[in-house]
Image (cartoon, rainbow, N blue to C red):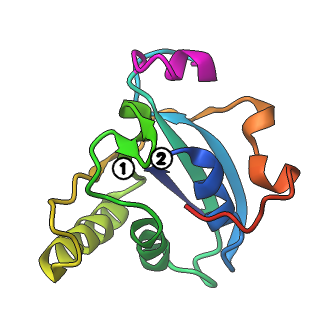
Amino acid sequence: MAIATFGAGCFWGVEETFRTTEGVTDTAVGYMGGTTEKPTYEEVCTDKTGHAEVVQVTYDPDVVSYDALVDIFFDNHNPTELNRQGPDVGTQYRSAVFYEDEGQKEVAEAKKAALQASGRFKRDIVTEIVPVQTFWAAEEYHQQYLLKRGMTSCHI
């Protein structure tokens, strides 16, 4: 198994998209990229901890490639919105790829560059590509939030 971590706005829809991807064996929502130890949702929402809402994806690389997961990430949010996604505003909603190793970094950077060059977006892609940091799991009520509420048709 391998791990990939993505921030693409509110983590509920992001998790649902990855959770239902063939080859993904587990997902967890949480916080990464900030300075506060063991942040709570309320703290992250103050926009003062520096954390992004993220989904940590555990996947079988024999079934789904990291390359494919990065495509899903870019296809399911607007990577040109700085510190927001739709109505959600703040650094916790930033677009980010947290890479585990140089291979993941290279894939993410190449995908970002290709997408920028494609002309699909009129604005620059602002997705951060940064090393993985400590993953702090979000509170239990956030885990598989949409599934628990029968809202599985939602996508990011």
The Cα atoms of the two marked residues, 1 and 2, are separated by: 7 Å
Residue 15 location in percent, x, y?
64, 55
Residue 30 location in percent, x, y?
60, 37
The magenta segment is 39-49
Label 2, on which residue? 9
Instruction: Say if residue 1 shows up in the picture.
Output: no
Which amino acid lies under the numbered mark 1 shown in the image of this protein?
Ser
Task: Decide which of 8, 105 is in the foreground and name it.
Answer: 8
Task: Decide which of 29, 105 is in the foreground and name it.
Answer: 29
Quarter of the image with the N terminus in it: bottom right
Which amino acid lies under the numbered mark 2 shown in the image of this protein?
Gly
- Residue 2 lies left or right of residue 85; in this view the side is right
- Residue 65 lies left or right of residue 143; in this view the side is left
Instruction: Say if residue 111 shows up in the picture.
Output: yes
Residue 95, disc: 1
* Main SS, magenta residues: loop
Which quarter of the picture shows residue 61?
Answer: bottom right
User: Which residue shows up at 58% across the image and 81% down it?
Assistant: 64
Asked which secondary structure carries label 1, the reply is: strand
- Residue 110 lies left or right of residue 89; in this view the side is left
